[in-house]
Image: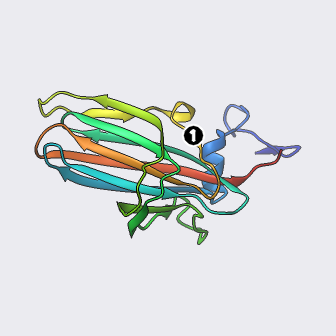
Amino acid sequence: MSYFGITKDGTTLATVCIDYVHHEIHDSKLFTYQDVITLASSGSMSYMITTGSTTKWAHFGYDMECIGPMTIEVYEGSDRSGSVVQTTWNRNRNSSASAVTVIHKGVTGGSTDGTRIRWWQGGVANNKTQFGGAPGSFREIILKQNTKYELKLLSGMADNITSIHFDWYEHTNVS
């Protein structure tokens, strides 16, 4: 039901509303990437996140699960290059809109990771699931335009099955 442009639930007449991130899905501005890898003891994987030279700002967050000890570091301003461009998905599967932000798996060249802006370390070698990241806006960071970010994973045990999940929405700032 709709009264004066406000949507109401047909049973309770409660106002229907959704949170902002949910709105970004409907607006075709929310994107995602997932990967599952197995890391050796002291094995590592880096992901390059490159924002566009546009007016769109990436509101970025990540979650990670693994079965053992893990270190996650996020660096801003890397001079390295991404190795293999990854497929990212618009979370509105009816939309053909694509992300400005580009994800690469692996990095090459360069001489600096950049400035470390996030760091997490945890887990024990007991094959129990460990988590990195945080829910909702606590994990979100608005990335700088036209900047390279390197997200590095470092395993603390052999055969460390690791799942990484990136979510971000892109919009033009209104200020």
User: Vertically, is 160 above or below 78?
Assistant: above
Left or right for 1, reference 99: right
At mark 1, the secondary structure is: strand
- Which residue is at a point 13% across and 43% down the rendered structure image? 41
Which residue in the protein does label 1 denote? 141
- In front: 36, or 41? 41
Residue 138 lies, in percent from the top left, at 53, 30
- Name the residue at the bottom extreme: 96
Protein image colouring:
rainbow
**Residue at position x 69%, y 40% from top?**
10
Direction from residue 120 to residue 19 in the image, left or right:
right
> Residue 133, relative to residue 96: is it above or below?
above
Say which residue appears at 68% left-offset and 31% top-offset. Answer: 12
Quick one: quadrant of the C terminus? top right
Q: Quadrant of residue 28?
A: bottom right
Residue type at mark 1?
Answer: Ile
Side (left or right) of 50 relative to 124:
right
Q: Position of residue 125 (x, y in %)?
A: 13, 30
Q: Is residue 5 above or below residue 87?
A: above
Decide which of 162, 115 is in the foreground and name it.
Answer: 115
Picture coordinates of residue 18, whole percent (x, y): 65, 40
What is the total number of numbered labels drawn onto the structure image?
1
Q: Position of residue 17 (x, y in %)?
A: 69, 38
Q: Is residue 142 above or below residue 35?
A: above
Q: Residue furthest right?
A: 4
- Residue at the farthest front position: 111
